[in-house]
Amino acid sequence: MPPRLRIRLPPSQFSGGRAPYICIQCRHASLASTIAPAPTLHPTTAHYPPTQPPSHKPPEYRKSQLHRQYQSLLRSSPLILIFQHNNLKATEWSGIRRELSNALRKVDVELAKDGKEVVGAAVKLQIVQTGILASALKVVEFWEPKYEADGQAAHPPSPVTDTSTAVQDARPDDAAEPIYTHGLSRLAWSTASRNAKTTPPPGSDLTPLLSGPLALLTFPTTSPQHLAAALSILAPTKEFPAPKRKVNAAYHEKPVQDGVAKLMLLGARVEGRVMDMVGTRWVGGIKGGMEGLRAQLVGMLSGVGVQVTTVLEAAGRTLWVTVEGRRGMLEEEEKDKGKSAEQKVE
């Protein structure tokens, strides 16, 4: 407790000529202004602004933002390669990213000459948190957001506005409000958890591949040319050989080679379908890219159509030959009967 100080006041203000004792704390308390009471919240005003809807997890945490980022990544990337890394150093990561960028840039140059889409700059290689990615994958697979343009009225910031009385109170777990049905909402979490227990895993389930430290290589579009270039850098094989030392000496530097040796391709997610390493390399080996695949599909369908037409024509031709042969036989029998009747008459 602080020491008490005696304050002497002018004697004219008190009777008897002696100032009374007043402690310094009491004097400060008497001079303090009155604390204003906290304003009461309007009962019909939502406590959550439209730009910051409530979340099942606190949105200010980094884990929540990573969860939201991984959901967007899984929904917007049609082609994702999954790698398992083992204690790569910063110099190894930078070398791998440099060589990957150079390889994708060469593919973009070749595609730009033919007037095709260039997406090499949008291909990203990033390290992910395995547990958070698994949770985000469960939300993406077992919960489908339904966004509605109507019914999202902006809540007033203050109860004194004219529109305060028209706003209904909204709860964080209110499923009727589209603003509260985002990827981090309680509705998304509860729906995904319930459907994961009652619904069998879909064909795009990546859960078996989510083990250990992971890195994702995401593509904005399904491009077999860019996939082949990435496989030749990150997971070279006989089908996708690494660049030779005479062509690209930087790729054969020790940090890059050590980093590539610590990467292991687990599989891929292509257009919502999970593929193993064989399927991933098959996609990368499509000649001519997606245009070449469409041309092969059109050729197959045309071949099937030609075969069906040939079979139908052969069946019709056979039927026509059979009918014509039978008609010829009947005509010959009629002629024979007419000749025999003429002979009897004679």
Image (spheres, rainbow, N blue to C red):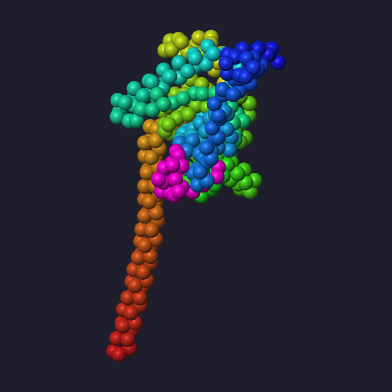
**Where's residue 36, x and y in %?**
54, 32
Residue 184 relative to residue 337: left or right? right
The answer to if 149 sits in the magenta stretch is: yes
Give the quarter of the figure containing the N terminus.
top right
Residue at position x 36%, y 62% in the image? 316
Q: Is residue 12 above or below residue 143?
A: above
Question: 267 or 98, which lies in front?
Answer: 98
In this rendering, does residue 30 appear at all? yes
Give the quarter of the figure containing the C terminus.
bottom left
Q: Is residue 272 above or below residue 284?
A: below
Residue at position x 60%, y 23% in the image? 29
Residue 189 relative to residue 316: left or right? right
Question: 35 or 13, which lies in front?
Answer: 13
In magenta, the rendered stretch is 146-172
Q: Is residue 242 above or below residue 298?
A: above
Give the prevailing secondary structure in the magenta stretch.
Answer: loop
